[in-house]
Image (tube, grey):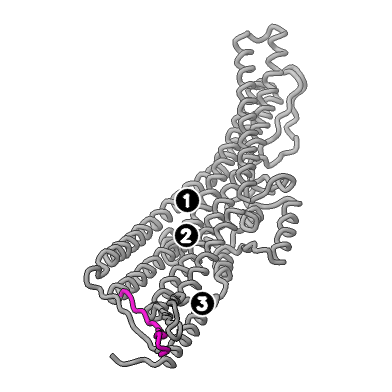
Amino acid sequence: MPRLGTAGFVGVLAGAWFLSGCAGEAKRDGFEDVRRIVDERSGLRVVWNRGSPEDLSVDVAVRGMLGREISADEAVQVALLNNRELQATYEELGIAQADLVQAGLLRNPFLSMEMRFPKKPAFPFEIDFTQDFLDLFLIPLRTRVAGAAYERAKLRVAHAVLEMAARARAAAFEYQAAEQMLELWGLYAAATEASEYAAERLHDAGNMTDFDFANQKAAHEGAMLEKTEAEGRVVDARATLSALMGVWGADGQWHMEKRLADLPAETISADELERAAVARRLDLAAARREVRVMVASLGMTRARAALPGLDLTAHAEGEPEGIATVGPSIGVVLPLWDQGQGAIGADEARLRQAWHRYAALMVEVRAEVQRACNRVKVARKRVERYRGVLMPLRQQITEDAQLRYNAMQIGMFDLLRIRQQQIDTGRAYVEALRDYWVARSELQRAVGARIAANEAATSQPVPAVPPVVATQPAEAAPMDHSMEMHHHAGGSR
């Protein structure tokens, strides 16, 4: 075996220390990549709260938005800036980056010392300085595995941000719809209250049976119960959105636009969105990166199995006669019995597992896009049907009924019943519009990016639902049909 002098051994250790130090330098902050990905795909801003001056400006910006009426998009932005669950997710980047740094470090050497007494004429001693030399050659492999895991972590974190944005956006739409539904249930309760008031006057005058009066009273009580449930749904929806935005206490007194936006002018192609999802979904990219991690891990396992250990030792020994010797030694672990069969087999299984999961996720992504596209198209058709056909018909029927009531051709109960039907149609329209926006948010999540840059709402007028106020009995003067109309069921702001 060729001899390695002391100077050569020291040179090898110095080179190993230098390479280890270079490999251990911190890489560029991966959060900048996450920030860029999120901005490209959503146009939203994200900040990792690590106690920097920027964090204080973010708090000021969040409170500034919460101090005024916010839109659904602004609610999503607040969630991305202020949600603590998301901040905890960002720490996955710190963990992965620390693992990458650790992978580039050479393992510490082992030092052993021995002294014997008495001296004859000098103290006998032995000193061994041992370094795992194989570890130096495994640093590139370890760094490759950790680097792939780091890239995977960035993709997973960015995907979590977009998932949070989709959840917050859907919650904002649910809250807006709940507010509109409460407003419409208020109108419905007012209509049934008017019917009950008129029925009570007629019943007291002996012009209505107990049976008919009980029916009118039950209808009003049912409407009041529905209104109470609508109030509860508003509270629940607000609490859900507040939790996603990470606000409570004084910050929880935020105000939001209480009307859903109209349908955007857009054309959705399922085939194009499916291809875009396969190319752009971050969880799919992370699954591809997982396959690379498993390939790199398998390569490192095979290298270790071929040569399990290689120790380089600097040995110094002093004899009792006063003679001192210095020299290197090499120790090799021979893979006679354990040749890494189990570890290699496990890594091969993990590689196949990662590949199958990637393939399964690709199929699921395509199915998600197809389902989301179908829900968006169905919801859009419902909204267009309500807005283009049913609501104008209900408006026309109500106006004709008002004229007939003024001409004393129908009674007040008939007019109120027709107005209640109009309000029912308005509620169904709001539900359809809510379903559309929630489905569209889910489609955007399934694609992994914004669907369209221009989301300008259509400008078609939305039929109005009049407020119902009746404080006079049926024998009173005709109801004024020229009262101001409000867009209670519409999407205009």
Q: In which quarter of the image is residue 418?
A: top right
Asked if 24 appears above or below 345 in the picture, the reply is below
The answer to whether one can see residue 45 in this image is no
Could you say whether the residue bearing mark 3 is in a helix, strand or loop? Answer: loop
Residue 237 position in % (x across, y down): 61, 41
Q: In this image, 392 relative to 348: left or right?
A: right
Q: In which quarter of the image is the N terminus?
A: bottom left
- Residue 235 drawn at (x, y percent): 64, 37
Identified by mark 1, the residue type is Lys
Real-space Cα separation, disc 2 to disc 1, in angstroms: 15 Å
Q: Mark 2 points at which residue?
A: 447
How many residues crowd mark 2 within 10 Å: few (<14), some (14–19), many (20+)? many
Up-down relation of residue 253 to residue 103 (above or below): above
Q: How far apart in space, not on screen, are marks 1 and 3 (Cα)?
A: 53 Å
Q: Which mark is residue 24?
A: 3
Nearer the observer: mark 2 or 1; the answer is 2
Considering every residue shown, the one lying at the far left of the view is 336
The span picked out in magenta is 308-323
Judge by depth and name the residue closer to the eye, 83 or 240. Answer: 83
- What's the amino acid at mark 3? Gly
